Image: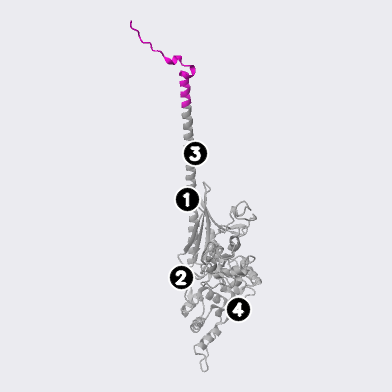
Amino acid sequence: MSRTPTFVNRSDHLPAPFGSGWRKGFATLLVFGVIVFASIVIGVLQSSAFAQAAAGRESLGRVRATWAARAGVEETIASLEQSTENPNGTSAFAEMDAMVAVAEGQLAGATWRIATTDGKQEVLGPADAGAKLNINRMTKAQLMALEPFMSDDVADAVLDWIDADEDPQPLGAEATYYQSLEYPLSPRNAPMRSIAELELIAGMDPRDVRGEDWNLNGLLDPNEDDGDASWPPDNADGVLDAGYSAILTASSVDGGLSVSGQTRIDLTATDEGELVSRLKVTNDQAKAIVDYMAATPAATMADFITQDLNTLARRARGQQGGGGRGQPQQPRVESLTTAQLGALLDESQIGPPEAGARLPGKLNINTCPAEVLDFLPEIQPETADAIIAERSARPQGFTSVGDLLAVPGIGRRQLAAIHELLCVRSNVFIVTCRGRDAGSGVEVEMRVTLNRASLPLVIEEVVVR
């Protein structure tokens, strides 16, 4: 008798948890897990996408801010070159006013602003390097006037750092000292290239150099006006205390083009016609100047300040063997007027410029703060006050060094003593331009040093942050 196999559904005999209900529950959990995992993945992808989008917006904003800052610098360059090629001889402030006029602007969704800090407030326009004393031309007496931090040993070390020899000043330091340091270095033995270089000099404290202006940008940044909340230490009084950097520079340059924007006259190689044309002197005055220069190898510009032309003309004739007895009487040469003397000082020099030489700049009496004059011991405090008072009374400023003769207390001898310290036209300007993207608020600061001693002007340094 055959039997038909009987197939038993084992699942019917499994306990309830391992039956169809369990499979349904497991499937539900699996689906839920997949949904959660997918949500996490999507969330991560979205977060990444948002981060990338934000980074992209920030990068785009930085590009716009950078180009805006550059546009502001380019506008300043164009303005400065225009003023250099076409100077306004009636106003010492015309070129700065022109640069202030382009100190703010906008470009493709971004803006720029060029400013510097003057006491408690920002003022539009670039900083004039000529408004500060150039460290590379200072004497020991001038260095010692930098109270209260300067001392004899530091002043001597500054002079040793700049001079070309290896002979130390009485309290100074040369290569032997610097090579003995934990981190050896060599003194430059040449003019400093930046004011920050002062920090390398023996005995110099960086806090004295920078004060609160730790990045040396000439602006009171938020971290420089928050007390001890962040570096550098500051007193949070809303005033930028910039230490030595407020009164000293290594950037200013002397020489270059004259106040009229032309190549300076070399008095050792000129002729009477050029002097008549450029200085507005008479033929007799021009001849006296040319003759005196030819007869006096050691002539200085101070000679023309302290002596009248008739005296110099007679001296030249005597040195040339003329003017003795039996010689016809020479007509009297008229003295240089104040305007003619100013033109002579502003438009000419003795000898050709040294090829490749960079002469440290003089102090611009039109743009320097009143207190900076106090650091020149050659100028008495009452004379410094009189210079500032006269400047304030002149809406157009001093258009010539000869204008100083109008200052009470300054005669020709005093002018002869100080004219090599002062000027009325600066060659170097520091442009601190901040570009800001309107959408993201991203800011880019571009600091550029412009030297217009020759044309086209030279961009000497660019710092972007």
Asked if the stretch drawn in magenta spans residue 11, the answer is yes
Which of marks 2 and 4 precedes in the sequence? 2
Secondary structure of the magenta portion, mostly?
helix
- Decide which of 23, 297 is in the foreground and name it: 23
Residue under pointer 2: 356
Q: How far apart are marks 1 and 2 (CA)?
A: 37 Å
Q: Is residue 383 visible?
A: yes
Specify which label sits upstream in the sequence, 3 or 2.
3
Q: In this orientation, which residue lies closer to the viewer: 78 or 444?
A: 444
Task: Residue type at mark 2: give it.
Answer: Gly
On the rendered image, what quadrant is the N terminus found in? top left
Chain part drawn in magenta: 1-30
For the residue labelled by badge 1, is the local secondary structure a helix, a strand or a loop? helix
Q: Which of marks 3 and 1 is nearer the N terminus?
A: 3
Residue 47 badge: 3
Which quadrant would residue 345 be assigned to in this image?
A: bottom right
The residues bearing labels 4 and 1 have C-alpha atoms spaced at a distance of: 57 Å
Picture coordinates of residue 71 (x, y %)?
Answer: 48, 55
Point out which mark residue 63 bears: 1
